[in-house]
C-alpha cells in the first residue's frame, strides 16, 4: 500500500497543486507573449516552450485528479507514480532552466545594460513578472516531484 501524502495523485491537494502549476505557467506564457519583441530572444522563446509543456503536463494530471476524485478511483499504483515522477522531474528541470536563462536575460537588459530605461519599446516589467511566474511554477513542480518521489519510495 502506498502512502497518502499531501499533493499526491487523486487527492484534492494534488489537484490544487496541479491547478497552481497550470495557472502560473499560463500566466507566465501570457505575460511573455504580450511583451514586445520577446521572439527576438532565445531564452524567452525557450521559456514559452517550457511553460507550454509544463501547462500541458499539469493540465493532464489535473484532469486525472478530477477523474479520480469524481469516480473515487485510486491512481496511486507503482507504474503510474513512476511515470509521474519522471514527468515531474523532466518538466521541473526544463522549467528551472528556462526560468534561470530568462532571468539572466532580464537582469542583463534591465540592470547591466540599462536598456529598459533607454529603450521604451522593451516591456521589461512584463518580462520580469513572467520570469517570476515561471519560478513559482517551478517551485510547485518541484514540490509535486518531491511528493511523487516519496510516494514511489514507500512502495
Image (spheres, grey):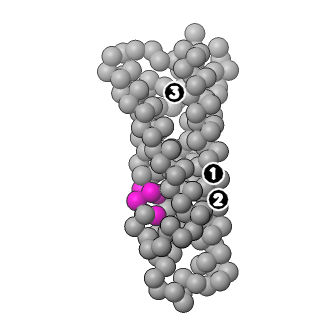
- In the rendered view, tell whether residue 129 sits above or below residue 58: below
Q: Secondary structure at mark 3?
A: loop
Q: Nearer the viewer, residue 68 or 50?
A: 50
Q: Secondary structure at mark 2?
A: helix
> How far apart in space, not on screen, are marks 1 and 3 (Cα)?
22 Å
Give the overall secondary structure of the magenta segment.
helix
* Quadrant housing residue 141: top right
Which image quadrant: the C terminus? top right
Residue 2 appears at what percent x and percent y? 58, 15
- In the rendered view, tell whether residue 139 sits above or below residue 152: below
Which of the marked residues, 2 or 3, is nearer the chain's N terminus? 3
- Mark 2 vs mark 3: in front: 2
Q: Which residue is mark 1?
A: 96
Q: Residue at x 65, y 17 (%)?
A: 154
Q: Residues within 10 Å of mark 3 (few under 14, many from 20)?
A: many
Q: Residue at x 64, y 59 (%)?
A: 100
Q: From this viewpoint, which residue is outermost toward the bottom?
A: 118
Q: Residues within 10 Å of mark 1 (few under 14, many from 20)?
A: many
Q: From this viewpoint, which residue is outermost toward the left?
A: 70
What stretch of residues is rendered in magenta? 27-32
Q: Residues within 10 Å of mark 2 (few under 14, many from 20)?
A: some
Which of the marked residues, 1 or 3, is nearer the chain's N terminus? 3
> How far apart in space, not on screen, are marks 2 and 1 (Cα)?
6 Å
> How far apart in space, not on screen, are marks 2 and 3 (Cα)?
27 Å
Residue 127 appears at what percent x and percent y? 50, 68
Q: Is residue 136 visible?
A: no
- In the rendered view, tell whether residue 18 sits above or below residue 97: above
Which image quadrant: the N terminus? top right
Tags 2 and 1 in contact by the CB under 8 Å rule? Answer: yes
Q: From this viewpoint, which residue is outermost toward the front?
A: 40
Q: Which residue is mark 2?
A: 100
Q: Which residue is mark 3?
A: 8
Amino acid at each position: 500500500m502506498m502512502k497518502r501524502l499531501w499533493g499526491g495523485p487523486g487527492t484534492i491537494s494534488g489537484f490544487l497543486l496541479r491547478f497552481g502549476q497550470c495557472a502560473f505557467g499560463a500566466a507566465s506564457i501570457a505575460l511573455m507573449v504580450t511583451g514586445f519583441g520577446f521572439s527576438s530572444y532565445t531564452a524567452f522563446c525557450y521559456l514559452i516552450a517550457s511553460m507550454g509543456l509544463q501547462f500541458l503536463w499539469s493540465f493532464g494530471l489535473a484532469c486525472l485528479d478530477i477523474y479520480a476524485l469524481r469516480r473515487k478511483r485510486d491512481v496511486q499504483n507503482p507504474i503510474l507514480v513512476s511515470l509521474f515522477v519522471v514527468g515531474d522531474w523532466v518538466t521541473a528541470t526544463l522549467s528551472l532552466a528556462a526560468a534561470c536563462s530568462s532571468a539572466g536575460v532580464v537582469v542583463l537588459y534591465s540592470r547591466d545594460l540599462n536598456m529598459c530605461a533607454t529603450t521604451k519599446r522593451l516591456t521589461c516589467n512584463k518580462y520580469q513578472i513572467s520570469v517570476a511566474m515561471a519560478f513559482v511554477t517551478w517551485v510547485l513542480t518541484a514540490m509535486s516531484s518531491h511528493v511523487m518521489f516519496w510516494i514511489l519510495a514507500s512502495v
